[in-house]
Amino acid sequence: MDLNLVRVLNRHDEVAPFIEAVSGASDANRDFLGFVPRGIFDEFARRNDLFVLVIRHGDNYEYAGHLLFSRRYPRARVLQLIVLQEHRGQKYGRLLCDRLVELLTSEGFTSIYARVGEDMRDANEAWQAMGFRVQRTEPGGVTTRRTIVVRVRELEGPQLFPTRKVDQADPLGLSRSLSTEIPLFLLDLNVLFDLSPLRARHEDALTLFQAERADFCKLAISDEIFAELARTGPSGRPDPMMNLARTFTRFPVSNLKIDSPIGIDLAKLVFPNKLPGSLSQNDVSDLRHLATAIENHLAGLITNDEACLRAARAIERKFGVQVLSSKAFVPEDAIGLNTIAYETARSDLQLRCASDSDEAEVRALLEKLRVAPAEIASGWLSRISTAFVVRNGPMLVAYMTWPALKHEGATTIRAAVDESISGAMEAARGVITHAMDLNVIGPTTLRLRTPPNQALLREIARGVGFCSGEGTSDLTKLAFGRVATKVNWNRRRSELADVSGLRMDAKFPLYRRIEQQIPYVTSDGDQGHETLERMETLLSPVLFCLPERPAAITPIRHEYAKLLLGHSRQGSLLPAPASNLFQEKHFISGPNAFSQLKRGTLMFFYESNPPRGKGELVAVARVRRSYRKDSAALEDADFGRSVLSEETVDEIGSAKMKTVTVFDNLFTLPFPISLQRLQEIGCGQSHDLITTRAIRDHQVQAVLAEAFRE
């Protein structure tokens, strides 16, 4: 292939002269590709979604092939890839594909899909050679009765924070700040003794040692503990505790001087009400064990000492080591979550806590997805982890699990989806959504670990801000999990810095536009800027409620609010709507709402008054975009993320034209704002709240101050 004679055209003005040749080549292959009107090629060319391959002959370029594709962030689809017969065998198809990969990677897309007839052997071999693996098969059209092979190629991590210094694949430097080594903890003697069946904390101690066997952590002891066991052990007969102690790594206990700078700081934190000269021998021993962990750069100390545990947060902030009890390794119960069923058009999904009866199927799923047996036995199928399964009817579609231990503030989520099974896309969405819902309470770092070739999971994860790091296949995300306001900004930015090292300006800026640049500094000291919109995506869920940011109150009926917003404390026995599987949801309303719900607007939901509604503001979210559409033209793509359907859409009003508002970063108000209080703030009477209406900044600030008061 002589690249001096070959060009790939993409701009509309370059492609336009070759549209006739593109359409002719497509028509000549309609048996395989189907019929595509010429106007479609014009439309795609204007969007720069058509590549044309041309070869130079003398002074002219002649058509040799084309690639037609569609893109809807974060995925793209190849619709046609054609190279004329006389030019095949020259790797021109690969050239077109490589140009597409280059373009989409630069724009932050995560995957490219292609559909190929199963009987098209040469085409399948070509796609395989270009890195498109088989994800699943599905029936083709009624006419051809062909089986379609769905192939996918995953792209490199998106560049969410493009700066000169920050790694493009890992913009916040999370993979550099988080160690991949298994954390090593120093054991206190009282925790070791808890292994005795007669001790009150026996079950917690068992869980701790099970965590070590599952490779969630490693345990060590000090020489002082070993000497104490030798001194107090039974004379003349074997001591099981001493035999156990011999299996641990040992560190020499620190010779900490109480009047040294570290000694003084530790004493003030752990024993704030005691003078240095009044510390007991046990107090000094506790401080020396803390110093041992600090001096040897261990992950922390595991102890039952109440004084040390009370000072744990301050010690971690100052010295970077954790102080934990053995109870920290016990998985939390999924409070209120037993089984969730989802109503979707194509699947009957159920998400529930995993049980012993699921183990054989989970193991088979992980083996099918090429997870190593050693990994299955430890991290994936540990009995001391929180775990969930997703089923489509009787079939196991997905599995996720995470341990109670947060190492360096990060929770490691292991997740797997059988992409070949119907309902895999919805299951993958449910896995990411619920893993975040159950783990993000305030600033949180999440690490997502998947089997190889999990395109769906990784695609959806990247869409909500997960990024990849150099040297690891794990995806990592920093979730803010807060609503930041002018009143609470200093507290919020301090929380974020404590968890991640990410620092943001002390001054809360005024809102100018959703594209305004927000500065930040990573834990490594790299400086960067990103737009407000993308910052809220990367740190989702989060809302930066800057002064002067546009806001509107929109009414929603009780029965729809409960389903769409999930704010009701009262559970439901009915299946959850499919919208709960999405981070981005759709709110369908009357035509006049369109002018108020522009991109970037803060959208406050007002649950309408009785008979069953509460008549109060209950939630706030970010508007991503909105559009108008005739109700007769609304389709699955519009309804799928909402709680309405073709049958119920007329219940929200008789106007034929509807506004579809796409929103995300939804937060329930901790303190709902009553109608009476809204009237006092000046947000209107009850009859003013039957339609969407904008509110002024002083009203927004008053609502935020009350709704998120601490």
Image (cartoon, helix red, strand yellow):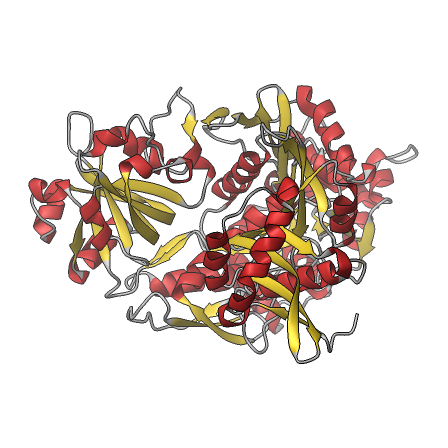
Residue at x 47%, y 37% (from the top left corner): 581
The location of residue 111, given as percent across then percent down, is 61, 52
Residue at x 63%, y 37% (from the top left corner): 401
- The residue nearer to you, when weighing 55 against 658, is 55
Q: Is residue 398 above or below residue 185?
A: above
- Residue at the far right: name it: 236
Quarter of the figure that contains the N terminus: bottom right
Answer whether residue 447 is visible to the viewer in this image: no
Instruction: Answer left or right for 427 relative to 507.
Output: right
Residue at x 73%, y 62% (from the top left corner): 92
The location of residue 347, given as percent across then percent down, is 53, 26
The location of residue 352, given as percent across then percent down, is 55, 26
Residue 207: quarter of image: top right
Q: Is residue 110 above or below residue 673?
A: below
- The residue nearer to you, when weighing 142 against 480, is 142
Instruction: Answer left or right for 129 relative to 658.
Output: right
- The residue nearer to you, when weighing 269 against 351, is 351
Residue 473: quarter of image: bottom right
- The residue nearer to you, when weighing 359 against 462, is 462
Total labels drawn: 0
Instruction: Answer left or right for 182 relative to 166.
Output: right
Q: Is residue 307 above or below residue 503?
A: above
Instruction: Answer left or right for 466 relative to 557.
Output: right
Answer whether residue 437 is visible to the viewer in this image: yes
Residue 609: quarter of image: top left
